[in-house]
Image (spheres, grey):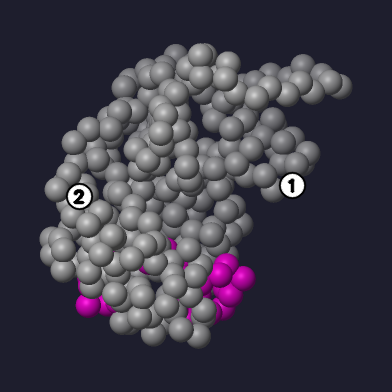
Amino acid sequence: MRKNPLELENLLNDLDMAITGNACLKSAFDMALYDLAAQKAGLPLYAFLGGANDKDIHTDMTIGIDKPKIMAKQAEEFARDRFPAIKVKVGTSLQEDVARLKAIRKAIGYNIPLRIDANQGWAPATALQILKALEPFQIEHCEAPIRKEHQEALVRINRESPIPIMADESLFSPADAFRLASQNACAYFNIKLAKSGGIRNALKIVAIAEAAGILSQVGCFSESRLAMTALAHFVLAAKNVVHFDMDAPLMLAEDPVNGGIRYGKKGRITLPDTIGIGATIDSKFLKKMEKQTLES
């Protein structure tokens, strides 16, 4: 049955009914449909969403878990490049995580904001102890300190932690956002299009955040500039988003994208005023990809 690609709500609702989960897959269809709708309207996607290209966007840079000396050296490199903030992966033990932050602060000082991401690595029983031990290193926020299953413990940690808590792995859907907000389980939301299922749900999540007085960050997986361009359009339509973790394309070996956002000095992201999303995958790159044909 042929369907109108401009009927976003109907099509995305049908997709939700047909497939359980698979948020990343759904986000690809969601982005494509929003791209078509904005092109049909003759507008950049951010304008189609009601936003304006008036926000100063600078991505942070991420340091993966490693030995303290190696992480400190990488922090020095990012500091020299004058990124506005550095995100540090933690989540092992009190001694190891303290050693990591201590080495990084010794290397770069206290002028650059640090953010940490535990990736659910700490046990509920020890998370507060570790967060309190990390307080002297002036951390802006901590992502996902414990596993998402421990919702009640997250509420207590958010209440007692000296470092603001950010929900990530516990935040996929608008229903998750409502639950986190209603239980006062975090100070920040981390919104990823591939995690929420795309722009439609991301807009619902950020609306809940705004209503609840929760600030938001946008984040990413190992995604290309195409996905990050769609995310930049969302950022320009969402005033509640104040932190930007959009560094994935800077870590990829290849850049197969035509058009889209550009990364400048200090991690500055610029978005051209192109109709729709304004980014496509290079056809030569696509020819190298594995192909599958589905027959009905």
Q: Is residue 181 above or below residue 239?
A: below
Q: Tell me the quadrant of the picture where the C terminus can be found.
A: top right
Relative side of 153 to 64, left or right:
right
Q: Which residues are magenta?
A: 134-157
Residue kind at label 1, given as amino acid type? Thr
Q: Does 228 sit left or right of 99 as displayed?
A: right
Looking at the picture, which amino acid does disc 2 mark?
Answer: Glu
Q: Please tell me which residue is depicted at 24% across the width and 37% down the height of the picture.
A: 268
Q: Nearer the viewer, residue 274 or 51?
A: 274
Question: Residue shown at 17%/52% (left/top)?
Answer: 79
Q: Is residue 192 above or below residue 132?
A: above
Q: Quadrant of residue 36?
A: top right
Residue pointed to by mark 2? 77
Residue 202 within the segment the image draws in magenta: no
Q: Nearer the viewer, residue 48 or 115?
A: 115
Residue sitting nearer the eye, 93 or 207: 93
Residue 20 has which mark? 1
User: Which is in the foreground here, disc 2 or disc 1?
Assistant: 2
Measuring from the top left, give residue 57's x and y in whole percent: 27, 40
**Disc 2 packing (10 Å; few <14; some 14–19; many ≥20):** few
Judge whether residue 195 can be spotted in this image.
yes
Element marked by disc 2: helix
Image quadrant assignment for residue 211 = bottom left
Q: Is residue 135 magenta?
A: yes
Left or right of 224, for residue 10 = right
Whether 241 is drawn above or below 157: the answer is above
Question: Looking at the picture, how far across and down is residue 258, in whole percent?
Answer: 41, 18
105 over 37 or under it: above or below: below
Q: Where residue 210 sits: x, y (%)?
A: 41, 54
Disc 1 is placed on an element classified as: loop
- Residue 89 visible? The answer is no
